[in-house]
C-alpha cells in the first residue's frame, strides 16, 4: 500500500510540480505584464502631467502677460491723469498769480481813491471852516461897524431943542 501510495504520489507529484511551475510561469508572466502596463501607465501619466504642467505654465504666462498689460495700461492712465492735472494746476496757479496782481492793483487804486476822497473831504471841510470863519468875520465886522456907527455922533441925530410951543 505504501508502494501504491508512492506510485500515485510520485505520478501526481510530477503533475503537481508541472502545475506549480505553470502557475509560477503564469504569475511571473502576469507580473511582467503588470509591470509593463505599470510602466506604460507611468509613462502616460508623466506625459499627461508634463502636458498639464505645460498648459498651466502657458495659462500662467498668459495671465501674467494680461496682468502686465493691465498694469501698463493703468500706469499709462495714471501718468496721463497726472500730466493733465499738473497742467490744470499750473494753469490755475497762473490764474491765481494774475488775479493776485489784479487784486493788488485794485487795492492800490482803492487806497489812492480813498486818499483822494479823504483829501477832497478835508478840502471841503476846510472850505466850510473858512466859510464859517468868513461869515463870522463878516458878522463881527458888521457888528463892529454897527457898534461904531451906533456910538458915532454922526449916526445920532442931533439933539434939537424941543420945538417951541405952538401958538394958538
Image (cartoon, rainbow, N blue to C red):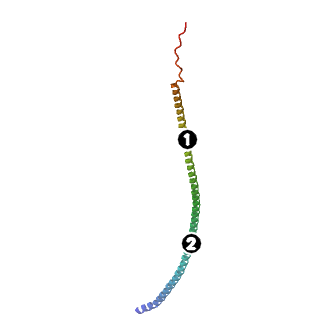
Of marks 1 and 2, the one in the foreground: 1
Q: Position of residue 11 (x, y in %)?
A: 46, 91
Q: Residue at x 53, y 33 (%)?
A: 137
Measured as percent of width and height from the top left, residue 74 is found at 57, 64
Identify the image quadrant of residue 52: bottom right
Picture coordinates of residue 101, whole percent (x, y) = 57, 54
First in sequence: mark 1 vs mark 2: 2
Provide the secondary structure element on which disc 1 rests. helix
As drawn, is 79 to the left or to the right of 24? right
Residue carrying label 1: 123
The residue beneath circle 2 is 61
Out of 85 and 30, give the one closest to the viewer.
85
**SS type, badge 2:** helix
- Give 150 or 59, whichever is nearer the viewer: 150
Q: Residues within 10 Å of mark 2 (few under 14, many from 20)?
A: few
Q: Mark 1 to mark 2: distance in Å?
A: 90 Å
In the current view of this chain or complex, which residue is farthest to the bottom? 3
Q: Residues within 10 Å of mark 1 (few under 14, many from 20)?
A: few
133 above or below 161?
below
Q: Residue lying at the far left in this picture: please name it.
A: 2
Would you place residue 5 above or below residue 84 in this image? below
Residue 121 in picture, x, y percent from top left: 55, 41
Decide which of 118, 147 is in the foreground and name it.
Answer: 147
In the image, 167 versus 95, the foreground residue is: 167
Amino acid at each position: 500500500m505504501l508502494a501504491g501510495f508512492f506510485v500515485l504520489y510520485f505520478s501526481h507529484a510530477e503533475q503537481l510540480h508541472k502545475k506549480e511551475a505553470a502557475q509560477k510561469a503564469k504569475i511571473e508572466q502576469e507580473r511582467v505584464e503588470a509591470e509593463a502596463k505599470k510602466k506604460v501607465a507611468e509613462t502616460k501619466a508623466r506625459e499627461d502631467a508634463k502636458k498639464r504642467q505645460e498648459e498651466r505654465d502657458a495659462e500662467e504666462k498668459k495671465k501674467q502677460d494680461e496682468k502686465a498689460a493691465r498694469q501698463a495700461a493703468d500706469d499709462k492712465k495714471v501718468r496721463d491723469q497726472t500730466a493733465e492735472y499738473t497742467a490744470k494746476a499750473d494753469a490755475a496757479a497762473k490764474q491765481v498769480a494774475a488775479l493776485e496782481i489784479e487784486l493788488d492793483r485794485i487795492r492800490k487804486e482803492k487806497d489812492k481813491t480813498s486818499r483822494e476822497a479823504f483829501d477832497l473831504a478835508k478840502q471841503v471841510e476846510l472850505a466850510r471852516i473858512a466859510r464859517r470863519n468868513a461869515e463870522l468875520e463878516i458878522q463881527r465886522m458888521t457888528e463892529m461897524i454897527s457898534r461904531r456907527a451906533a456910538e458915532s455922533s454922526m449916526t445920532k441925530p442931533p439933539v434939537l431943542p424941543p420945538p417951541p410951543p405952538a401958538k394958538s
